[in-house]
Image: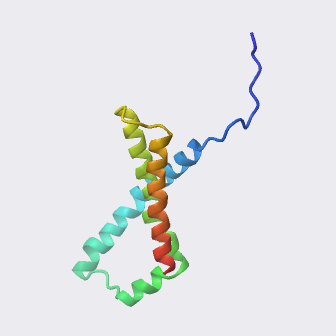
Amino acid sequence: MNNAIPPRGRGLHFEPLWWLLFSAGGVCFAVFIPAVALIFGVLWPLGIVDISLAQLQGYYGSLWGLVFTGAVICLPAFHAAHRIRHAFHDFKLGGGSTTAFICYGTAAVVSFVAIWVWFM
């Protein structure tokens, strides 16, 4: 009987990375999305918050705009991708490497486009 411990580092596992992005995206979904919806969906149209379009463009063009993009678009995209991948797995419709590639690839493309739009 061979009870030897296999050497560390055999194979590269991305699952911890996906769980990190999943949890970070979940926090952003819970904290930032309701705040953005409240400010831009309720308070701004009612005139309670007075922000001009020039101010918004100035804020969004700063480094904080990049952080905002990451917190409101990129991380929640990976959160959603992780949930969709595991839903496919739970319904026995996939869940393997092909499903992971499609889900996380889509989230990466959405994130890339969001960051690209920020740089333009």
Question: Can residue 27 be seen in the rendering of this structure?
Answer: no
Residue most toward the front? 98
Q: Nearer the viewer, residue 3 or 36?
A: 3
What residue sits 59% from the left and 44% below the top? Answer: 14
Q: Residue at x 56, y 42 (%)?
A: 15
Can residue 40 be seen here? The reply is yes
Q: Nearer the viewer, residue 73 or 11?
A: 11
- The x, y position of residue 103, in whole percent, is 44, 49
Name the image quarter holding residue 106: bottom left
Tell me the quadrant of the picture where the N terminus can be found.
Answer: top right
13 relative to 109, above or below: above
The number of callouts visible is 0
Front residue of 23 and 97: 97
Q: Residue at 39% of width from left, 90% of height from top?
A: 54
Q: Position of residue 71 (x, y in %)?
A: 47, 64
How far across and how far down the image is residue 48, in percent?
27, 80
Q: Residue furthest left?
A: 46
Q: Where does the image place residue 5, in percent across and percent down from the top left?
A: 75, 24
Above or below, 22 against 117 in this view is above
Instruction: Locate residue 32: give its quadrant.
Output: bottom left
